[in-house]
């Protein structure tokens, strides 16, 4: 297991939080730009020295600073931590073949041949990095990093700047290649869709602090606070009963009234627009607005249209989650708002 706990000051901002990544699990570190995500990767890899904190890997101390104990700061090359960043760090004066062999103490690519074939690098072995496209360079970086005996893999915005098609392809490739590796994997990204496709667990960061952590599925369905919910894509918070509110995620709304699946809410249609994936609606829910796309259904506008928010999280007046709609007694007893 990888355990990281640190405090560091960057550009006048104090960044302080901890995280754990378990063997065979993938942890996503997610938050807005400037939240302190990449800093955690740099501290873990030994590329940045925190003011205080520690980095431990399977009981082996990699970093220990700011305590009364003897300081420890292993250099990056002794940590057995692989790093794939958004800018592939390839040696420009070496060919792809030489880049793949660098640091391995070998003269043959034989152990890497299955990965070279999977990543379609065979035709590129004689090329220099300057002759590669962004996607090709990233594939070389992936092969070189996974070809080493790393005990942890860090991914820092590895698909940034690539087009959607190539990003999907590389994500699937990386997913396949990591399937047999029982090591902790940490992904930093500012796109929630990418994190949701890849990670098992999640830690949400804002302004250098952790807002919460846990299994990705649980956090996406039931963010602990309104602040966390907003970062995780909940765009609208509608008062339903007293001072309590439901969190509305655009991807968890259906164009029909089905009280067995969640909270039914009357809406006012402000505008519609046909898009490639269906019809995009701008709706008013209470005193707030919501933009949502329905692929298979159109709202019935003959009567008062209603939508169903699928089992949403419910928040109290303090902004903390009270539970899901289906398990919240206050809402279950409210005979008027869900009919």
Image: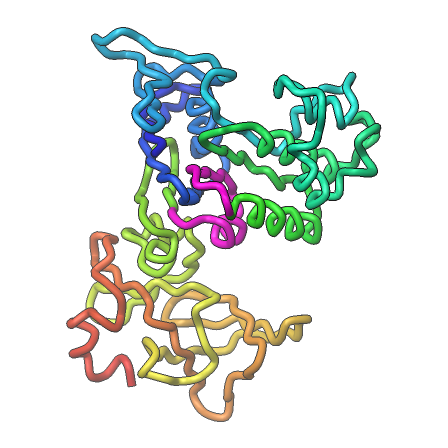
Q: Locate residue 286, reporting x and y percent.
A: 36, 71
For the N terminus, the image quarter is top left
Q: Which of the 4 quarters of the picture holds residue 203?
A: top left
Q: Is residue 141 rendered to the left or right of residue 286?
A: right
Tell me: residue 280, above or below residue 142.
below
The residue drawn where x is 71% and y is 29% is 109
For the C terminus, the image quarter is bottom left
Which span is picked out in magenta? 180-201
Q: Locate residue 154, reporting x and y percent.
A: 50, 33
Residue 40 or 277: which is nearer the viewer? 40
Is-magenta flag for residue 175? no
The residue drawn where x is 26% and y is 70% is 325
Q: Is residue 244 rendered to the left or right of residue 106?
A: left
Q: Would residue 85 be seen by someone viewing this image from the given angle?
A: no
The residue drawn where x is 27% and y is 6% is 70
Residue 79 or 334: which is nearer the viewer? 79
Q: Locate residue 177, reporting x and y percent.
A: 58, 45
């Amino acid at each position: 297991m990888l355990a990281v706990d640190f405090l560091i000051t960057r550009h006048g901002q104090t960044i302080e939080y901890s995280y754990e990544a378990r063997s065979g699990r993938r942890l996503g570190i997610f938050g807005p730009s400037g939240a302190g995500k990449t800093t955690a990767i740099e501290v873990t890899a030994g590329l940045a020295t925190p003011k205080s904190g520690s980095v431990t890997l399977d009981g082996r101390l990699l970093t220990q600073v700011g305590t009364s104990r003897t300081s420890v700061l292993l250099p990056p090359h002794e940590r057995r931590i692989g790093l794939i960043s958004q800018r592939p760090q390839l040696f420009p004066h070496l060919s792809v073949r030489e880049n793949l062999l660098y640091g391995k103490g070998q003269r043959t690519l034989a152990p890497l041949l299955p990965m070279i074939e999977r990543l379609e690098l065979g035709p590129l072995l004689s090329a220099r990095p300057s002759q590669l496209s962004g996607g090709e360079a990233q594939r070389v970086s992936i092969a070189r990093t996974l070809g080493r005996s790393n005990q942890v893999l860090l991914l820092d915005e590895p698909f940034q700047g690539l087009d959607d098609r190539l990003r999907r392809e590389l994500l699937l490739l990386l997913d396949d290649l990591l399937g047999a590796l029982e090591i902790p994997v940490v992904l930093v990204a500012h796109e929630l869709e990418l994190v949701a496709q890849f990670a098992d667990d999640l830690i949400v960061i804002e302004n250098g602090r952790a807002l919460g952590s846990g299994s990705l599925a649980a956090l996406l369905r039931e963010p602990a606070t309104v602040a966390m919910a907003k970062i995780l894509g909940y765009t609208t918070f509608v008062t339903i009963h007293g001072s309590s509110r439901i969190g509305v995620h655009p991807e968890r709304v259906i164009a029909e009234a089905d009280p067995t699946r969640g909270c039914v809410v009357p809406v006012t249609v402000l505008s519609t627009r046909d898009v490639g994936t269906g019809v995009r609606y701008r709706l008013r829910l209470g005193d707030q607005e919501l933009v949502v796309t329905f692929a298979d259904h159109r709202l019935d506008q003959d009567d008062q249209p209603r939508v169903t928010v699928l089992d949403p999280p419910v928040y109290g007046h303090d902004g903390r989650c009270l539970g899901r709609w289906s398990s919240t007694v206050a809402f279950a007893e409210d005979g008027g708002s869900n009919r």
